[in-house]
Image: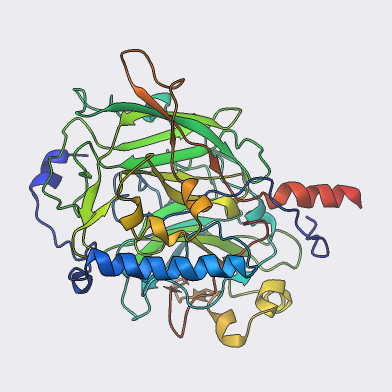
């Protein structure tokens, strides 16, 4: 996949519609059965991805909604429907979860593979919350491939404190821990992409 | 889902309400909004680019104070997974899910409306076969939600939730009931303009967005810190549907048109670039 970094992204022909906050009342609309189970917990290779979402006072946010989007274990970008009505076998690469009353979230998923040889594997994350006027994007990098992480263009453009906010911690039981701080000293690095306006 | 249980339970609604903010007057919130907008208009006069998205740091919306990043968003060149989106289809969404008036045994109370339009990307290309999700209050301004304690009636025939998959030209259509405004606790006597929440996907996951559609001529627009967090008037207008008599149907429902434009796809132009080499 070309990065085309030396080429300016073309201007938009139409102005993008503004975002707005998700608000507090999405409870019957967005969550669905097995929304956070990209794979069954019993599947070999199933990994727990979890953490807490906090605000600028360090207080947990009990009404955030998160989505992840990732390649499979071999680094393939999948294009399979069935995310909303999961059959328990098909890996669609996408999941959603509302945090619980103490701001904690859990996904059951697979470790994403490298999409290209030598690339650092990561999961894309989107954050929505009451009080957050537009969605935020970030990346959850796996911690293991230190050489790939050292060569990653995004991570290389960050200082050490910022860089740490994007790399998950592997816990003793194999879980991935990734906390999200919307504001403050340990604020997560959130991303913008070309062609947003 | 059971509307009976949610109606009868009592809940701590502190998640929704900010008690510290409720004593502030509408006048002082409106003045804060006016000051921010005046500074924005001056910046445009001085040559700054027009803003198309809401400020995420917008103090008149009190809940945003501790929930916005203080550092600038960091530029990323999108890579593989970011250049694609999850796939949704008939397996995921039944065609009847786009009619919010047939989900229970009876007809919901209120003004039946059809909201129809297209989902496009920033290059004007239709976003076909993608998921659109909506949710909204009922005709009395009440959500089916344990945290909504507004003393307005729940309608047992209306949940206020719908889904659709866009057609080949990016088109969608929902049949629903016109939602009412409702009070909230941002400040004293705060009311939200009537709106429908929309959740949208594009061809690239970087186009993912959630927003709110409003109705033309709402007298609450100028008072609402969520709507006014979009500092640019042209941008705010993009969230307002248009009454469309060609969508209105004889003796059945009035019609509104609302087209949604996502940000630009990066996959398409980057693939074009690759093809050039």
Left or right of B111, for residue B57: right
Is B102 situated above or below A32? above
User: What residue is drawn where x is 29% and y is 44%?
Assistant: A28
Residue ranking furthest to the right: B277
In front here: B140 or B130? B140
Residue B221 seen in this snapshot: yes
Q: Give the x, y percent position of residue B95.
A: 43, 25
Residue A21 seen in this snapshot: no
The quarter of the image holding the C terminus of chain A is bottom right
In front here: A186 or A85? A186
In front here: B234 or B98? B234
Where residue A80 sits, quadrant-wise, is top right
Left or right of B139, for residue A144: right
Left or right of B81, for residue B178: left
Is A59 situated above or below B130? below
Is B234 situated above or below A143? above
Where residue B252 sits, quadrant-wise, is top left
Q: Give the x, y percent position of residue B153.
A: 12, 40
User: What residue is drawn where x is 47% and y is 74%?
Assistant: B69
Q: Give the x, y percent position of residue B176.
A: 32, 30
Q: How is the image coloured?
A: rainbow
Q: Give the x, y percent position of residue A25.
A: 28, 51
The quarter of the image holding the N terminus of chain A is bottom right
Residue ranking furthest to the top: B250
Is B264 situated above or below A194? above
Left or right of B65, for residue A150: right
């Amino acid at each position: 996949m070309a990065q085309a970094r030396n080429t300016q992204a073309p201007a938009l022909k139409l102005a993008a519609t503004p975002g707005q906050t998700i608000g507090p009342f999405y409870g019957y609309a967005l969550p669905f059965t097995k929304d956070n189970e990209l794979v069954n917990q019993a599947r070999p290779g199933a990994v727990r991805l979890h953490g807490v979402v906090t605000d600028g006072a360090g207080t947990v946010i009990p009404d955030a909604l998160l989505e992840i989007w990732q390649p499979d274990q071999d680094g393939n970008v999948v294009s399979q429907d069935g995310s909303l009505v999961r059959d328990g076998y098909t890996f669609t690469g996408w999941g959603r979860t509302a945090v619980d009353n103490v701001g904690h979230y859990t996904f059951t998923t697979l470790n994403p593979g490298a999409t290209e040889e030598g690339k650092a594997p990561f999961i894309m994350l989107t954050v929505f919350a009451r009080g957050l006027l537009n969605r935020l994007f970030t990346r959850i990098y796996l911690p293991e491939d230190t050489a790939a992480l050292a060569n990653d263009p995004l991570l290389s453009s960050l200082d050490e404190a910022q860089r740490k906010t994007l790399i998950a911690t592997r816990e003793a039981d194999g879980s991935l821990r990734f906390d999200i701080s919307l504001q403050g000293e340990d604020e997560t690095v959130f991303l913008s992409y070309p062609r947003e306006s | 889902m059971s509307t009976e249980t949610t109606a009868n339970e009592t809940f701590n609604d502190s998640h929704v309400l900010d008690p510290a903010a409720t004593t502030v007057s509408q006048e002082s919130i409106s003045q804060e909004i006016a000051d921010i907008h005046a500074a924005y208009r001056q910046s445009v006069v001085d040559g700054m680019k027009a803003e198309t998205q809401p400020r995420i740091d917008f103090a008149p919306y009190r809940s945003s104070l501790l929930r916005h990043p203080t550092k600038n968003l960091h530029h990323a060149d999108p890579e593989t997974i970011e250049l694609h989106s999850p796939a949704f289809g008939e397996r995921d969404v039944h065609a009847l899910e786009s009619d919010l008036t047939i989900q229970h045994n009876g007809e919901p109370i209120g003004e039946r409306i059809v909201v129809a339009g297209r989902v496009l990307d920033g290059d004007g290309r239709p976003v076909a076969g993608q998921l659109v999700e909506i949710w909204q209050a009922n005709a009395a301004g009440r959500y089916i939600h344990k945290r909504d304690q507004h003393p307005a009636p729940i309608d047992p025939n209306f949940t206020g939730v719908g889904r659709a998959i866009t057609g080949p030209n990016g088109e969608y259509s929902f049949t629903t009931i016109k939602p009412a405004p409702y009070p909230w606790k941002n400040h004293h006597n705060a009311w939200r303009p009537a709106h429908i929440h929309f959740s949208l996907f594009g061809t690239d996951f970087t186009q993912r967005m959630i927003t709110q559609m409003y109705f033309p001529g709402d007298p609450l627009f100028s008072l609402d810190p969520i709507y006014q967090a979009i500092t640019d008037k042209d941008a705010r207008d993009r969230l307002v549907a248009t009454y469309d008599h060609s969508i209105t149907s004889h003796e059945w429902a009035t019609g509104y048109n609302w087209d949604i434009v996502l940000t630009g796809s990066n996959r398409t132009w980057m693939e074009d670039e690759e093809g050039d080499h």
